[in-house]
Amino acid sequence: MHKQLLGNRPSLLRLAFPLTIVAVMCFAFLPLTNAVIPAPDGGYAGENTAEGTSALFSLTTGVWNTASGFGALKSNTTGRTNTATGHQALLKNLSGEGNTAVGAQALVNSTTVSSNIAVGCELWNQHNDWF
């Protein structure tokens, strides 16, 4: 009865081996994945959060910062309680505190000033002494 059910079909083992080889070969050619430490979406010391290439790139001891966007708060080292959302928002901030910048290059040249709010593209990016 057993032979009648299988007939001339190859066994499962004979099929499984070549399929396994093909599957392994496919996975071998997948591109390598590079991990970022800390992972995006947080995980930074001091309860900082960053999302985007080079966001909070230079951070040393700053705490409670949020950076979202390419280069947001990139130069920030010791600044705290800053929020930067947008391409290069608060890019050159080093130690300023309590700043909020929303928009592409908002407060981009601000380095050490504190307690500023800028909403819009390229706001207050020419002089550091306006604040």
Image (tube, rainbow, N blue to C red):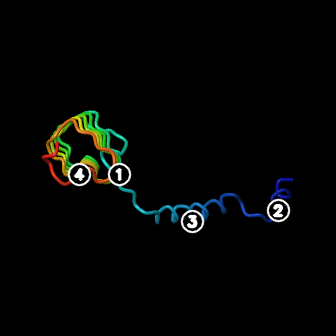
User: For the residue labelled by badge 2, is the local secondary structure a helix, a strand or a loop?
Assistant: loop
Percent from the top left, x then y, of residue 66?
30, 40
User: For the residue labelled by badge 1, is the local secondary structure a helix, a strand or a loop?
Assistant: loop
Q: Earlier in the sequence, mark 2 or mark 4?
A: 2
Q: Earlier in the sequence, mark 2 or mark 1?
A: 2
Work out how far the residue at label 2 is from the one at label 1, CA to CA, in angstroms: 51 Å
Work out how far the residue at label 3 is from the one at label 2, CA to CA, in angstroms: 26 Å
Percent from the top left, x then y, of residue 43?
32, 38
Residue under label 2, please give it. 7
User: In the image, what residue type sits under mark 4?
Assistant: Val
Query: How many C-alpha atoms fall within 10 Å of the one at disc 3: few (<14), some, or many (≥20)?
Result: few
Work out how far the residue at label 3 is from the one at label 4, CA to CA, in angstroms: 52 Å
User: In the image, what residue type sits under mark 3?
Assistant: Val
Image quadrant in which you'd find residue 21 = bottom right
Work out how far the residue at label 2 is from the one at label 4, CA to CA, in angstroms: 75 Å
What residue is at 50 percent from the left and 61 percent from the top? Answer: 27
User: In the image, what residue type sits under mark 1?
Assistant: Ala
Residue under label 3, please give it. 22
Foreground disc of the pair 3, 4: 4
Percent from the top left, x then y, of residue 1?
87, 53
Q: Earlier in the sequence, mark 3 or mark 4?
A: 3
User: For the residue labelled by badge 3, is the local secondary structure a helix, a strand or a loop?
Assistant: helix
Q: Quick one: 30 or 89, which is closer to the camera?
A: 89
Q: Which mark is residue 35?
A: 1
Q: Which mark is residue 108?
A: 4
Foreground disc of the pair 2, 1: 1
Q: Quick one: 117 or 87, which is closer to the camera?
A: 117
Query: How many C-alpha atoms fall within 10 Å of the one at disc 4: few (<14), some, or many (≥20)?
Result: many
Q: Quick one: 53 or 124, which is closer to the camera?
A: 124
